[in-house]
Structure formats: C-alpha cells, structure tokens
Amino acid sequence: MNTCHSIYHAVKEKGAHWKSDTPSAITKDVEKLILDLEPYTQDDSEASHLAFLLKDLLEVLSIDFSSAADQQSASMLLIDEITQASHLCEAA
C-alpha cells in the first residue's frame, strides 16, 4: 500500500469526525497527514493534489473569520474535496 492509499484510509476514518471537531483538532490531524504524505514523487499527481488540498485546509483553519459559521462552511467544502481526492488515490 503506498502513502496515498494510507492517506485515503486516514481521511475516510477521520473525515466524518472533522465535521464536528474543533479547528485545532482538525489542524493536528491534517498536519500529521501532510507529514505522512510528503515527500511524494513529482509523477504522483494524486498525492500532489491531495497535499495541496490539505495545505489549503490548514490555511482556512488558521484564518480569523468574522464568524465561526463562515470558517466551518469553508472547512467543510475543503473536507469534502479532500475526501473526493482521497478516493482518486484509492482508485489509482
């Protein structure tokens, strides 16, 4: 099983919890996933895309939004996209 597949299983397990977790708990999980995913080869477009999305999620979680609902909405969109991208890793 390659790293991308490992990330798929971690996202599958944690993704459902992320929808109700605090931003700091999600941040810890995402940082670990990024460390697990990198380094990846330049030929691994799925891993590259997934790492990009995970880093975007970290950035969204670090932004001081005017409302918690805005931050949660932005986070949920990225979490859904990360879940979809991780499915591509599994299919590859």
Image (spheres, grey):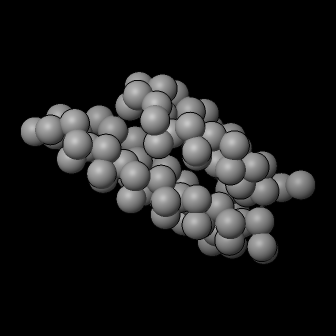
Q: With 65 as the anchor, is 33 left or right in this view?
A: right
Look at 40% across and 52% down and name the residue there.
Answer: 76
Q: Is residue 35 at least partly visible in the picture?
A: yes
Q: With 33 as the anchor, is 69 left or right in this view?
A: left
Quarter assignment of residue 83: bottom right
Q: Nearer the viewer, residue 54 or 9?
A: 9
Look at 31% across and 44% down and name the residue there.
Answer: 72
Q: With 73 as the anchor, is 78 left or right in this view?
A: right
Number of numbered tags placed on the structure image? 0
Question: In the picture shown, does residue 7 fall above or below 49?
Answer: above
Look at 58% across and 46% down and name the residue there.
Answer: 15
Residue 47: image location, x then y, percent: 64, 61
The residue furthest right is 1
Q: Nearer the viewer, residue 24 or 48?
A: 24
Question: In the picture shown, does residue 60 fall above or below 49?
Answer: above
Q: Is residue 48 at least partly visible in the picture?
A: no
Residue 74: image location, x then y, percent: 30, 53
Q: Nearer the viewer, residue 63 or 68?
A: 68
Indicate the quadrant containing the N terminus: top left, top right, bottom left or bottom right: bottom right
Q: With 59 as the anchor, is 3 left or right in this view?
A: right
Residue 32: image location, x then y, percent: 60, 33
The residue furthest left is 66
Indicate the quadrant containing the C terminus: top left, top right, bottom left or bottom right: bottom right
